Image (cartoon, grey):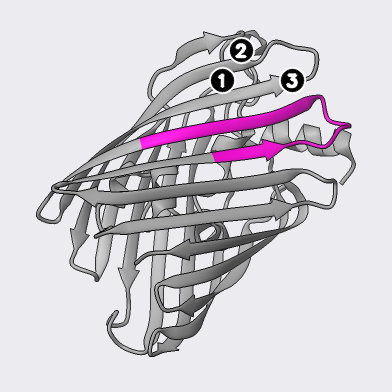
Amino acid sequence: MPVRARASLLALVLPGALAAQGRPVPVILGFPSSVQAAALAGAGVGLPGYAGALFVNPAGLAPIRVLSVEGGFSRTPDRSTYAMAAAAGRIGHFNLGFGGRYLRFPDTSSTYDNLSYAGAAVYRYSGIALGASVKYVSVEERNQPVARSLTGDLAVQVAFFDIAALALSAQNLGQGRLSGPGLELPEALHLGFRLNLLDTYSNGRLLATIESVWSRGDRGRTVVGLEAGGAVAGLGIVARAGSGRQPGLAGGLLSNTTFGGGLLLGRARLDYAFQHRSALGRDVHLFGVRWTP
C-alpha cells in the first residue's frame, strides 16, 4: 500500500482520528493486546490469564498464579516495525503487570513513531477481579514537538472457574498532558466473554470469544473468535479465526476477518496471526511468544 494511502487509512481506522485542535491520534492503542487476540479479530478483553491483557483489560491479569511473560513482533512490507512485551505476576491477593508497545513508521511517513507503556494492578476476591492501569502514550511527528500524555483504564472481571470469563473494560479515562498539544484518546467501553467449550484438562481445545465495543466517535461493533486444536502431554497445535467490523469509520478498508494459530510447548507457546488489511498495512504477519510457568 502506498504510504500516502496508508496514512489516509490510519486516519480513518481509529475512532476520533479527525482530532479536534490538531491533536495526534496514537494508532498503537487500537492494536490487539496480543498475537492470539490479533488472530481472533482483536477480541482480547475476554481472554484473561496472560501478561498482554493489561493493554486492554487490566483485570485480565487475575488468573496468573505465578508469572506470565510474552512478546510480539511484526515487520511490514513498507518497513514499519511493531513490537510489544509484557510481564505480570502474583503477590498475595494482588496481581501486578507492566508492558510496552512500540510502532516505528517508515522514513517516508510524516509520523516517526508511537510509544506506549502500561502498568496495572489487580485485586482478586474469589472469582471477581478489579483492575486498574495507567498508560503513558507518546506520538512523535517529524519536525514537530513530541506529544505525550497519561491516561488510564478500569476493568472488572468475573471468572467461572476455568470454563468462562466475563469482563468489562473502560479505556482511556481522562488525560494528563505531559508535553506538546496532547493526544486524541477516545474513551471506549469493551464487553468481552470467553467460553471453553471443552474441558481444559482434556486433549481437545475449543474456545469461543465475543467482544462488543462502544467508543466515542464510532458506532458500536462486535467481533467473534474461535480457537480449536488439540494437545497431548502439553504439546499441541491450535488454529484461530476471527471476524467482525474493525475499529473506526473506514467503511471496509480493514479486513473484517483474521486468521492464525499457535504451537503449544508445555508452559510456552508460539503464536501467529495474519490480517490482509490492517492498521499496519497490507498482508501483515504477527509473531509472538508466551511463557507462563
Estimate the spatial distance between the alpha carbons at disc 3 and disc 1, rounded to whole Å: 14 Å
Rendering quarter of residue 180 = top right
Q: Residue at x 60, y 69 (%)?
A: 260
The image position of residue 76, as x and y in percent, is: 78, 51
Q: Left or right: where does residue 255 sit relative to residue 179?
A: right
Which numbered disc, 3 or 1, marks the residue that appears first in the sequence? 3
Which numbered disc, 1 or 2, marks the residue that appears first in the sequence? 2
Q: How many marks?
A: 3
The image position of residue 229, as x and y in percent, is: 47, 83
The residue nearer to you, when weighing 247 against 2, is 2
**Amino acid type at image mark 3:** Glu
Q: Are marks 2 and 3 in contact (CB under 8 Å)?
A: no
Q: Are marks 1 and 2 in contact (CB under 8 Å)?
A: yes
Res 6 seen here: yes
Marks 1 and 2: which is nearer the front?
A: 1
Residue 267: give its label: none
190, above or below 12, in the image: below
Q: Is 67 in the magenta? A: no
**Amino acid type at image mark 2:** Ala
**Is disc 2 placed on a helix, strand or loop?**
helix
Which residue in the structure is indicated by mark 2? Answer: 20
The image position of residue 61, as x and y in percent, is: 31, 50
Q: Residue at x 51, y 37 (%)?
A: 219
Q: Left or right: where does residue 232 sit relative to residue 33?
A: left
Marks 2 and 3: which is nearer the front?
A: 3
**Is disc 1 placed on a helix, strand or loop?**
loop
Residue 184: give its label: 1
Q: Are marks 3 and 1 in contact (CB under 8 Å)?
A: no
Rendering quarter of residue 286 = bottom right
* Magenta-colored span: 101-119
Res 49 seen here: no
Marks 3 and 1: which is nearer the front?
A: 3
